[in-house]
Each structure stands twice: as structure tokens, then as C-alpha cells.
Image: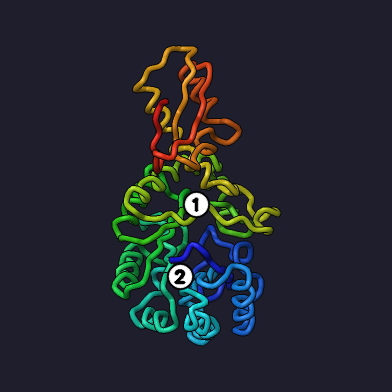
Amino acid sequence: MSDRIIPIFIPHLGCPQDCVFCNQRSIAAPHEPSEDEVAGMIERALTLCGDGAELAFYGGSFTAIGYEKMTGYLRAAEPFVRDGRLCGIRVSTRPDCISPGILELLKNYGVKTVEIGAQSCDDEVLALSARGHTFADTVRASGMIKDAGLSLVLQMMIGLPGETDETPMENARKVAALGPDGARIYPVVVVRGTGLERMWRDGKYQPLTPERAAELAAGPLEYFELHGIRVIRIGLNPTEDLSGGEALAGAYHPALGEMTRSVILLRRMRERLRAAAPKAGAEVTFLVPKGRGSAAVGQHRRNVEALCAEFRLARVRVREDVSLAGYEVRLA
């Protein structure tokens, strides 16, 4: 998997379900591109980012859009893979739309990564969300993708109907057990025109705040990273439609990943202070890994202010230390 992605969003094509959280008009492309348009998009993107990027088809359930449409998009991208300008292709799809034959086809056209929208590992939650598949489908699809020698990325959601506070960690453990190369964590956003909007307005669904979503995502993020699973993204990618009013409630925030890492660091700093038991009125300095200083301080200095209040400290400082890694925290 490359760190440089050329995303091409396709409309809500092929998906057999109408999940309660989904309005693809708000999060995917409004226009169905032709093969020539796809080739043109790739060409233009490569002039900006240079050779070696990975092409990603996002939006619909790629392997369910029909053979001709699917192979047409793959044909448009294949020459760029063959001449080395693209390092490969990634596609996103549903766990019940994978078969050995489809995987062989994808490999023949240069697909290297398959992302699966697992969303939950709880069959009751999946049913309440109208997903139309079970966790067994996710297990089966994941095994086939790995057996085919392709990279596997699993997507999980937090805050679906029927979940409890324990569900995210239960899901994280089950997702990690499938051995994915990467994961995405998507706390739920209430999008206009969805079944979830109706449930919310009828008082049958309570959406997460961004702050609560960050707290619930912190455990899975830390668990995945501990087990060598790269977390590619936390939270929906901001779009003009979502930011312009399509996101009605829930965990829609452009810095949700940073907020989640901030939660982990706050927990670490709290642990250090409990062990050190500083006197009231003391000033303390934390050492955190390079690049983690802002997250440790927290948005609007939320973390340091919370620690000052909880432990009756006069001041909390944060310094970055290149000798530390991950979420390691020390008192200076």
C-alpha cells in the first residue's frame, strides 16, 4: 500500500442494500465517470503527485457494480499500472460481494488492496443497520482476500444502532483477529436523507458527539496499532456537501483523528500523575514523542486544563522528545 493515493469516487453503484447510515449522494460522486474520464483523472493526478501512487476506487461497492462497468474502470487504470506510473489499484466493497473468481479478476488488472466494509462484528447491530450481511461474511471475505495474496483493509464503525460502550473494543479485537494490513474507524455521522436521520428525529437513536466518538475510538486505535495494524483514517473525510449541511449530527469533525490520539495521551498523562502523586500547586512537565505535542496539550488546551483541575496543579507543560515513540509519556 502506498502513502500516496489517487482517489476516484464513483456513485452508489451496485450496492444491494440501503444501510441506515448511508446516503451515497452526500459522500460519493454525483456523476458516473466514463472509462475515458477515469483515464483523464489518473493522468492529471499523476502530473501533480508523480509516479508511484496507488489508485483507489471509492464510493460504491466496486465488485457489485456489474461486470462490464467494473472491468471498464479497471481497463482504464491498467495501462498506468503496467507502465509503473501507478503502483497498484485498491477497491472498496462489501463482504458479501467477494468470491475467488472476482479476486482473480481484480488481480489480473493490477488490484493490490481490497477494503471491506465490515462496519460491525455484531450480527444484531448489522441487522439494525440494514447491512444485509453477517459477520461470518466478513470472516469469509477476509480469508479469501488474504489467500489471494492481496492486502486487506477492514472498515469498522462506532455508534451504530444497538451498540453499547463495550462494542467498539469487542469489534476491534475481532477485526484484528482477521489479520488485516490496515483499518479505518468511522464513528457514525447522521447524514440527511438516511434511515438514521428518521430514527434520530423520532427519538429512536442518540448520535455520538465528536468528543464521545474520540473517547470510544481511542481503545480500538491503540489496540490496532499495538498489533501492527495501520489505522488509515478515523472519521469521514470532510466534503463540501457534508460540511455544507448534509451532516446533521454525530461525529463529523475534521480533526477527529487528532482528537482520538489526544484522548490516548490524556489517559497516559493521567496514569503518570496518579503514580507520581504530585503535591497540590506543583508544576509538571511531560515528555511526549515528536509530533505528539499538540495532541498531548489537547484542542484549546483541554488536556492540560483537565489535568490541572483534577490534580490541583499550578501548571502543566508538554515537551516533545525524539527518544520516545508511539504514545509513550514520561514526567521530566
The C terminus - image quarter? top left
- The mark that comes first in sequence, 2 or 1, is 2
- The amino acid type, in three-letter code, at marker 2 is Thr
Residue at 38% from the left image edge and 66% from the top image edge: 152
User: Dot 2 surroundings within 10 Å: few (below 14), some, or many (20 or more)?
Assistant: many
Indicate which disc residue 129 carries.
none
Q: CA distance from mark 2 to mark 1?
A: 18 Å
Closest to the observer, 17 or 145: 145
Farthest-out residue, top: 280
Q: Which residue is mark 1?
A: 234
The N terminus - image quarter? bottom left
- The amino acid type, in three-letter code, at marker 1 is Ile
Instruction: Indicate whether 322 appears above or below 81.
Output: above
- Secondary element at tag 2: strand
Indicate which disc residue 93 carries.
2
Residue at 36% from the left image edge and 51% from the top image edge: 224
Residue 269: x %, y % from top left: 42, 29
Farthest-out residue, bottom: 68
Instruction: Indicate whether 293 appears above or below 279.
Output: below
Residue at 47% from the left image edge and 14% from the top image edge: 282
Instruction: Indicate whether 269 appears above or below 211.
Output: above
Q: Is residue 148 visible?
A: yes
Closest to the observer, 284 or 92: 284
Farthest-out residue, right: 244
- Secondary element at tag 1: strand
Residue 107: x %, y % from top left: 39, 80
Taking the image as shown, residue 28 lies to the left or right of residue 114, namely: right
